[in-house]
Amino acid sequence: MWPVALALALQRQLLLTKPFTSWEHIEFLVTATIFWWPVIGPIEELRMAPLGAVVYVFGACGGAHRTCDSPNLRAARLVSGVPLQPVDTLHILPLIRDRWGLTPER
C-alpha cells in the first residue's frame, strides 16, 4: 500500500505548485474536448445519433466512476487512516444532509 500513499503525497505536493495546476487544467479541458467531440462536434454528419450519444455519455461516466475512482478512494482511506471528506466551502452540507436527508451511506 505504500505506493498509493506515495502517489497521494506526490499529488498533494504537485497540486500546490502553480505550473502543475495550470497544466492539469489544460489537460482536463483537452480530455473533455476529446470526450465530447463525438456528441457535440462542429461537423453535423460526424455527430452521434441522440440515443447513441445518451448511451455513450452515461456508459462512459458510469463505468469510469465505478472502476477508477472508488478503488482509489478506498485505498487512500486505508493508507492514510483518515476518511476523505469534502471541504464544505459553500456551507450547504447541513442542507443536503439534514433537510434533504442525503448521506454518504445512501
Image: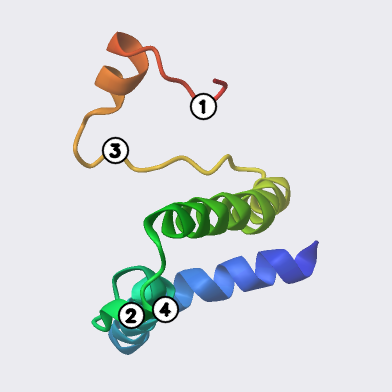
In the image, what residue type sits under mark 3?
Answer: Asp
Is residue 93 shown above or below 75?
Answer: above
Q: Residues within 10 Å of mark 2 (few under 14, many from 20)?
A: few
Q: Nearer the viewer, residue 46 or 24?
A: 46
Mark-to-mark CA distance, 2 and 3: 44 Å
Image quarter where the C terminus lies is top right
Q: Is residue 23 left or right of residue 42?
A: right
Question: Is 6 rendered above or below residue 34?
Answer: above
Cα–Cα gap, marks 3 and 1? 14 Å
Expressed as whole percent of the image width and height from the top left, the position of residue 97 reads: 36, 18
- Look at 27% across and 77% down and name the residue there: 44
Which color scheme is applied?
A: rainbow
The answer to whether one can see residue 16 in this image is no
For numbered disc 4, what is the local secondary structure? Answer: helix
The quadrant holding residue 46 is: bottom left
- Kindly state the secondary structure of the residue where label 2 is placed: helix
Q: What amino acid is at disc 4?
A: Thr
Sequence-earlier tag: 3 or 4: 4
Estimate the spatial distance between the alpha carbons at disc 2 and disc 4, rounded to whole Å.
22 Å
Who comes first in sequence, dot 4 or dot 1? 4
Say what amino acid the circle numbered 1 marks.
Pro
Disc on res. 104: 1
Q: Which residue is mark 2?
A: 45
- The label shown at residue 31 is 4
Looking at the rendered structure, which numbered label has been put on residue 88?
Answer: 3
